[in-house]
Amino acid sequence: MELTPKFRGSDILELQNFNLASVDDIASVHAKAYVSGLEKAMDQASKKGLILIEGSGPTYATSTTFHESLVAAGAGLALVDSVVAASKNQLDPPTAFALIRPPGHHAIPKGPMGFCVFGNVAIAARHAQRVHGLKRVFIIDFDVHHGNGTNDAFLDDPDIFFLSTHQDGSYPGTGKFDEIGIGAGEGATLNLPLPGGSGDTAMRTVFDEVIVPCAQRFKPDIILVSAGYDGHVLDPLASLQFTTGTYYMLASNIKQLAKDLCGGRCVFFLEGGYNLDSLSHSVADSFRAFLGEPSLAAEFDDPAILYEEPSTRVKQAIQRVKHIHSL
C-alpha cells in the first residue's frame, strides 16, 4: 500500500538497525523471574511447535517468541531514542511508529496476557525516564480493549499518566471509571469505558474534552500511544464504530498535541487490529496524518454500514469521567 507520493518518500525513515531490549530493560516493568521463565519455556516451544502459556488469557508462544518480543520492545526503545535526539535539533521532529508484534498493553508485571508478552509502551516509558530524564510521560491508549498491563504497571506512579479509552464490557473486563491509581499515583490513571456503538463523533468529543485538558494539566515531557485499531467498525472482536477517518483524526491531533506540549516528542506503538483491510488502511492513514498529507479514508470507509451512535450514553460517560478527574 502506498503511504505517500513518491516525491515525499524521503519523509519516511525506517529504523532497521537497533538493539534488542535487554533483560534489564524488560525488568524495569516485569519481574525477572517471569523473563527468565519465559526464556526457558522456549525449549518446550521448540519441541511442540506451539504452546499455550497457562493463565495468560490466552497467549501462545513459538520457539521464536522470546526473541521477537525483545525485538518489539527494543524497537520502541530505539524510537524513543531517535525522537528525543531529533527534538534537540528540530522544532517539529518526526512522529515515530513502532509497527511491532507481539503487542504489549495487556502484559502484566508478572506475566503475559491477551496475546501480549512484554509491555512495550510501559518499558519505553521507563526508558524515557531513566535514560533521557524525561520525568513526565503521558500515555494514550485508544485500543478497543483496556490496557490493563500498562494500567497496573503505573498505578502508584504520579509521573506517568495513563489514559485509556475502550469499549465498556470488553476483554479483559478492567478499566472502570473508578480505577484512578493508588497512593501517590491517585489521579494519574484515567479510564473511560465507552458504550458499544460509539464512533467518530464520540471520539472527537473525547479528544477535545478529556484527552487535551488532561495532557495540558499534566504537562508531559513525551507522549506515548498504544495505537490499537480494533475499534474500527469492521473489526470482528468488538462493536465500536471508529472509521479510518477516526484514526487519521487521532494521529493528526496527537501529533499536534505533542508539538504543543512536549517539543513534538511522540511515539506510537501498534496494539490490536484483527481485520487486515481496516488495519492496513487505518495505519496508512495515520502515517498520512503524521506527514501532513490529506486523508484517503473516504476511499475505504463506507458510511452506509454505520448506525446512530448512542450519544446520550456517550455524553454520560464523558461527563462522569470529567467529574471524577475535575476536568
Image (spheres, rainbow, N blue to C red):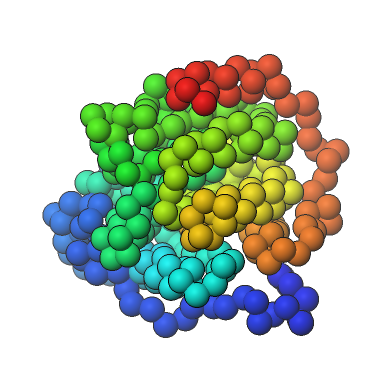
6 horizontally vs 22: left or right:
right
Task: State the count of labels.
Answer: 0
Q: Measuring from the top left, give residue 221's x and y in whole percent.
A: 42, 54
Q: Residue at x 39, y 70 (%)?
A: 81
Q: Is residue 302 visible?
A: yes
Residue 81 or residue 147, whichever sits in front: 81
Q: Given the current orientation, which residue lies at the most extreme left position?
A: 33
Picture layout, residue 56 above or below residue 291: above
Residue located at (69% from left, 52% from top): 248
The quarter of the picture where residue 148 lies is top left
Q: Is residue 63 above or below residue 266?
A: below
- Residue 72 visible to an observer of this rendering: no
Relative vertical location of residue 125 with respect to residue 96 in this rendering, above or below: above
Residue 53 in picture, x, y percent from top left:
29, 50
Residue at horizontal 26%, vertical 60%? Answer: 130
What residue is rendered at 44% in x and 32% in y? 190
Residue 27 percent coordinates (x, y): 21, 57
| In the image, residue 259 above or below residue 138 | below
Q: Position of residue 158 (x, y in %)?
A: 30, 39
Quadrant in which the N terminus appears: bottom right
In this view of the protein, which residue sits in the foreground, 272 or 221?
221
* 148 vs 48, nearest the viewer: 148
